[in-house]
Amino acid sequence: MAIDTLRAAIAQRRVVTFFYKGYSRSVIPMAVGQSRDNTWMLRGQQVAGGSSSGGTSIDAPKLFKIAEVMDIAVSNDTFAVPSQYRPGDSAFVVIEAEL
């Protein structure tokens, strides 16, 4: 289950890889939880791969719908907590796991 994989990746501070909206991505997972409409979401910072928004730049953390994440895997790459990370993400009404 993707939520269990993301929970483990957050605890181990490991980058995850997955396909999302047709693009392969590498993402630093910051938080997993449910949004106001009860959708399971990942807050993460993309560090490699493509994007429908037109780039591979490392920028502000994004929200990913977990139901649309495919072929998720935990990589061997570790990370330091990004400076953009803010605990208690207001996008979530329930936080399952966070840095």
Image: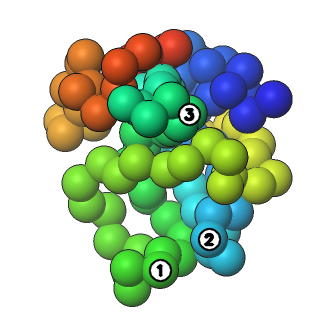
Q: Bin the neighbour count of mark 1 within 10 Å (Cα to Cα): few under 14, some 14-19, many 20 and up.
A: few
Earlier-in-chain disc, 2 versus 3? 2
The residues tagged by marks 2 and 1 sit, at their Cα atoms, a distance apart of 7 Å
Q: Residue at x 53, y 36 (%)?
A: 39
Tell me the residue that label 2 is attached to: 21
Number of the label disc, if any, that sits on residue 99: none
Q: Position of residue 38 (x, y in %)?
A: 50, 29
Give the residue type at disc 3. Answer: Trp
Q: Position of residue 19 (x, y in %)?
A: 69, 63
Tell me the residue that label 1 is attached to: 52
Q: Residue at x 43, y 16 (%)?
A: 95
Quadrant showing the N terminus: top right
Q: Which residue occupies the extreme front position in the image?
A: 37
For the question of whether residue 18 can be seen, the reply is no
Number of the label disc, if any, that sits on residue 40: 3
Q: Position of residue 75 (x, y in %)?
A: 69, 41
Q: Which residue occupies the extreme bottom position in the image?
A: 54
Earlier-in-chain disc, 1 versus 3? 3
Q: Nearer the viewer, mark 1 or mark 3?
A: 3
Q: Position of residue 13 (x, y in %)?
A: 51, 25
The residues tagged by marks 2 and 3 sit, at their Cα atoms, a distance apart of 16 Å
Looking at the image, residue 16 sits to the left or right of residue 44; the answer is right
Instruction: Relative to 66, say whether 91 is above or below.
Output: above
Give the residue type at disc 1. Answer: Ser
